[in-house]
Amino acid sequence: MYTKKEYNESKGKSSKKQTASAKEGPGLAAVIVSALGGADNINTVTNCYTRLRLTLKKPELVNEAVLKNETGASGVIIKDHNVHVVYGLQVSSVRQAVDKYLGRESEE
């Protein structure tokens, strides 16, 4: 059993951890791009409310373990050349970092 204070403290620590991982900027973007098979493998980058949505030339190059364990993704869905990486509500900052790393402008 936890007191309300202990629960709120533990909840605050986990949310700070997620926010920090999403805001690591170029370092995080480099890991994401590498786990997706490199910049040359990425055709398009968009996002919806919780997912980074990509089309890739060779989806078999995706390293799901790195995306989940090192970038904070909670899931990876691959269907043909379409890949969705689930980041939750911080996906827009993740996409901005990836776009900046790739030298592309966000089309929001």
Image (cartoon, rainbow, N blue to C red):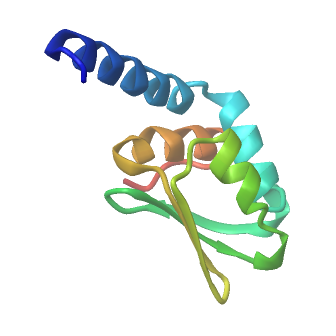
Q: Nearer the viewer, residue 41 or 67?
A: 67
Question: Is 80 displayed left or right of 21 in the figure?
Answer: right
Residue 20 drawn above or below residue 76 = above
Residue found at the far left of this picture: 4
Residue at image position (67%, 34%) is 28
Residue at image position (31%, 24%) is 11
Q: Position of residue 1 (x, y in %)?
A: 24, 24
Q: Position of residue 77 (x, y in %)?
A: 57, 74
Residue found at the far front of this picture: 1
Q: Nearer the viewer, residue 26 or 8?
A: 8
Q: Nearer the viewer, residue 106 or 7?
A: 7
Question: Is 60 displayed left or right of 102 in the figure?
Answer: right
Whether residue 103 can be seen here: no
Occupied quadrant, residue 84: bottom right
Q: Position of residue 88 (x, y in %)?
A: 39, 50
Residue at image position (52%, 42%) is 94
**How many callouts does the rendering have?**
0
Q: Nearer the viewer, residue 81 or 87?
A: 87
Residue at image position (60%, 46%) is 99
Whether residue 50 can be seen here: yes
Q: Position of residue 75 (x, y in %)?
A: 54, 61
